[in-house]
C-alpha cells in the first residue's frame, strides 16, 4: 500500500509537468510544420521560376490557419482566391499542389501581423503580395493560453527564422 501511495503521489506531481511538455511539443510541431511549408514554397518558387504560395485552409476549406494549409505553385493572378486548391490544374494558367498540411494537433491558437491568408514567394524567393509587389516583414506565431509563443518571422527576402518567446513578448518582425 505504501508503494502504491508513493506512486500515486509522484504521478500527481508529474502530471502538470507532463501536460506542459505535451502542449509545448504540439506548439513546436505546428511551428516546425509551417516553417517547413514556407521553406518548400520558397525553394519551389526559385526552382520553377514562378510564384509559390502557402495558403490558409487545406483542401479548399476557408477559415483559419488552424484548419491546415496548402503549399502550391501558382500561375493565377489572384493567389487562387486565398484558398488552397483541392485539385491540380495543369493548364498554363493553373496551379500544382506540392503539399497539404492538416490541422495542428491539440488546443492551440495562432496570431500574425497583418491579415493575409497566404504567404507568397516569387521566382527569386522573395515575399510578395498578390499583385507581385514586395511585402514587409511578417510574423506568425502559435500559442496556448499563457504558454510561450512559437514565432516564425519571415523577412521580405523570404528567409524564415524561428524563435520562442514568453507569452507577453512580441514576435518581432524586424530583422
Image: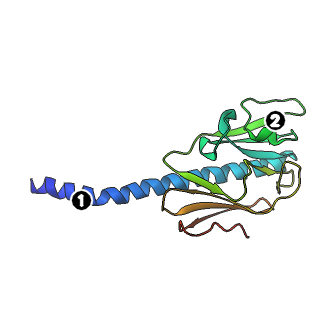
Real-space CA distance between mark 1 and mark 2, rounded to the nearest whole angstrom: 55 Å
Question: How far across and down, in percent of the image, does residue 144 sit?
Answer: 50, 56
- Placement of 174 over or under 107, stated as above or below: below
Say whether residue 12 is left or right of residue 159.
left
| Residue at x 21%, y 58% (from the top left corner) | 9
| Residue at x 65%, y 41% (from the top left corner) | 63
Question: How far across and down, in percent of the image, does residue 14 sit?
Answer: 30, 59
Say whether residue 34 is left or right of residue 155.
left
Question: How far across and down, in percent of the image, does residue 118 sit?
Answer: 74, 48
Say whether residue 78 is left or right of residue 13.
right
Q: Quadrant of residue 71?
A: top right
| Residue at x 84%, y 46% (from the top left corner) | 51
Q: Nearer the viewer, residue 37 or 108?
A: 108
Residue highlighted by disc 2: 95
Residue highlighted by disc 1: 10
Q: Looking at the image, which residue sits at the far left?
A: 1
Q: Nearer the viewer, residue 99 or 85?
A: 85
Which quadrant is the C terminus positioned in?
A: bottom right
Question: How far across and down, in percent of the image, does residue 107 sit?
Answer: 49, 48
Amino acid at each position: 500500500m505504501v508503494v502504491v501511495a508513493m506512486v500515486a503521489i509522484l504521478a500527481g506531481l508529474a502530471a502538470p509537468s507532463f501536460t506542459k511538455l505535451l502542449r509545448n511539443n504540439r506548439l513546436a510541431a505546428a511551428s516546425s510544420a509551417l516553417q517547413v511549408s514556407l521553406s518548400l514554397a520558397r525553394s519551389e518558387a526559385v526552382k520553377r521560376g514562378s510564384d509559390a504560395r502557402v495558403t490558409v485552409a487545406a483542401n479548399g476549406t476557408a477559415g483559419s490557419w488552424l484548419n491546415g494549409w496548402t503549399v502550391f505553385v501558382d500561375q493565377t493572378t489572384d493567389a487562387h482566391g486565398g484558398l488552397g486548391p483541392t485539385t491540380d490544374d495543369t493548364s498554363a494558367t493553373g496551379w500544382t499542389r506540392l503539399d497539404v498540411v492538416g490541422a495542428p494537433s491539440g488546443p492551440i491558437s495562432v496570431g500574425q501581423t497583418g491579415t493575409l491568408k497566404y504567404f507568397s514567394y516569387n521566382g527569386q524567393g522573395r515575399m510578395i503580395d498578390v499583385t507581385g509587389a514586395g511585402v514587409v516583414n511578417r510574423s506568425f506565431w502559435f500559442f496556448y493560453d499563457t504558454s510561450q509563443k512559437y514565432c516564425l518571422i519571415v523577412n521580405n527576402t523570404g528567409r524564415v527564422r524561428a524563435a520562442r518567446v514568453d507569452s507577453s513578448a512580441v514576435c518581432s518582425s524586424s530583422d
